[in-house]
Image: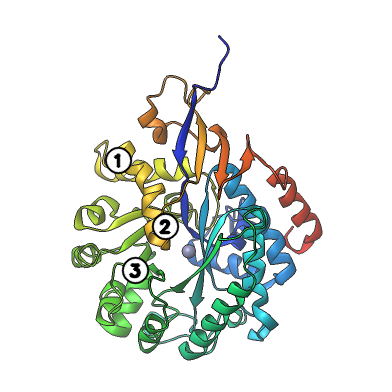
Amino acid sequence: MSRGDEHLIRVPGPINAHSHAFHRILRGRTHEGAAGGAGDFWTWREQMYAAADQLDPAGYEQLATAVFAEMVVTGWTAVGEFHYLHHGPDGTPYPDHAMERALARAARTAGIRLVLLDTCYLSGGLDTDGRAVDLNDTQLRFSDGDAGRWAARHSALRAALASDEPATAEAGAGLVTLGAAIHSVRAVPPAALAVVAGALAEGEPLHVHLSEQPAENAACRAAHGMTPAELLAAHGLLTDRLSAVHATHLTAADISALGAAGCSIVMCPTTEADLADGIGPARQLADAGATIALGTDQHAVVDPYLEMRALEHGERLRTGIRGRFSPAELAAASRTGGLRSLGLADNDDHLLVDSASLRTAGSREAQLPLTATAADVHAVVINGIEIARDGIHTRLGDPAALFREFTYEHREFA
Ligand SMILES: [Zn+2]
């Protein structure tokens, strides 16, 4: 039986609320360590730093264009880019916000909505006794020196992005907005937290990595006598503009506080599985009043359907109960949760999804979050423009070719 168009389901465009574009370099390269094992989160982080060390603005733009194109063809219509690779080697600033503008150009070229989460990153971490660790050579590229200088750069960046705003939708008008982030309580000392919060524009979203690893909690307790969520609360940061990313290892009091404050929680289920982070208490957070959003974080997988499914699968594996999140709740996490987390207004961005493919034939429409994959995304419309069809970007072609060009031209990553 041949098929008309009746099998194409219109789906509101998924929102990727947590991304580090350059982490894409590590895909498929971190699963064997020198000693035969794959290491842990902290050894993965060393590999990530080695990748960050190699990037300049031109390479960053080329890579981010490929990553954003991959997001578009797989069905993500907006991205929150948690960006901290601000400066050149030794922390020397590039002129004119070169790295940030590289990301903005990449998003406009790829036709994706970008919320550039301009990240404050000031210290190298906390040791097991809770003492601040000096920035290493790579981390120098992340740091503005102090929170006041972050705030000044952030304000200047806002003006720079506004001055770059294109005139037409075809050129990307309206696609790029600015948000803020605190890397984590490991990387931003308590005295700097309020400075960052005080520098935000009205309605500007604020993101933070929260309790991704038990070691972060232990170090925070050693340093400050409280959990990371309690530390944020003590400095007035638990509000409905805050998005906590991961929120994997929380106390019952943390869950209540995040929920009562109306925070958004960005779960990154495929990354949390890949990095052996653990399974966060997503259902409990939602029940406490938090809004769940989804992100691809390090891009081991870029597929909105697999993130939705992994959120529910984690809950099932942890609790032995099916249907912890209904299919409608999974779809909402990918859409309205992301809009709220990134401070975006509702829009007409949408997908046409094939409900009669090898994977989806026979599925009830409402249950597609449990059966479809990015391979079933037939068309992607962002900002009124059909920007992808059947895995091919309408301007840039096959995103895989963009990655091949990047790795051919950047042998240092081979
Ligand atoms: Zn992250």
Answer with mark 1 or mark 3, whichever residue precedes in sequence. Answer: 3
Residue 7 visible? The answer is yes
Crowding around mark 3 (Cα neighbors within 10 Å: few <14, some 14 to 19, many 20+) is: many
Answer with mark 2 or mark 3, whichever residue precedes in sequence. Answer: 3
Assign the C terminus to one quadrant of the image. Answer: bottom right
Q: Amino acid at mark 1?
A: Arg
Mark whose residue sits in front, 1 or 2: 2
Mark linked to residue 316:
1
Q: Nearer the viewer, residue 141 or 42?
A: 141
Residue 329 pos. (x, y %): 31, 43
Look at the numbered disc 3 and give the secondary structure of its residue.
loop
Q: Amino acid at mark 3?
A: Arg
Question: Does the residue tagged 3 have its C-beta within 8 Å of any atom of ligand 1?
Answer: no
Residue 373 pos. (x, y %): 50, 35
The residue singled out by tag 2 in the image is 345
192 vs 213: above or below = below
Question: Does the residue tagged 2 have its C-beta within 8 Å of any atom of ligand 1?
Answer: no
Relative horizontal placement of residue 287, taking residue 13 as reference (left or right): left
The residue drawn where x is 56% and y is 43% is 381
Look at the numbered disc 2 and give the secondary structure of its residue.
loop
The residue singled out by tag 3 in the image is 241
Look at the numbered disc 1 and give the secondary structure of its residue.
helix
The residue drawn where x is 41% and y is 74% is 184
Residue 104 pos. (x, y %): 62, 65
Relative horizontal placement of residue 65, taking residue 267 as reference (left or right): right
Q: Amino acid at mark 2?
A: Ala
Answer with mark 1 or mark 2, whichever residue precedes in sequence. Answer: 1
Q: Disc 1 versus disc 2: distance between alpha carbons?
A: 32 Å
Mark whose residue sits in front, 2 or 3: 2
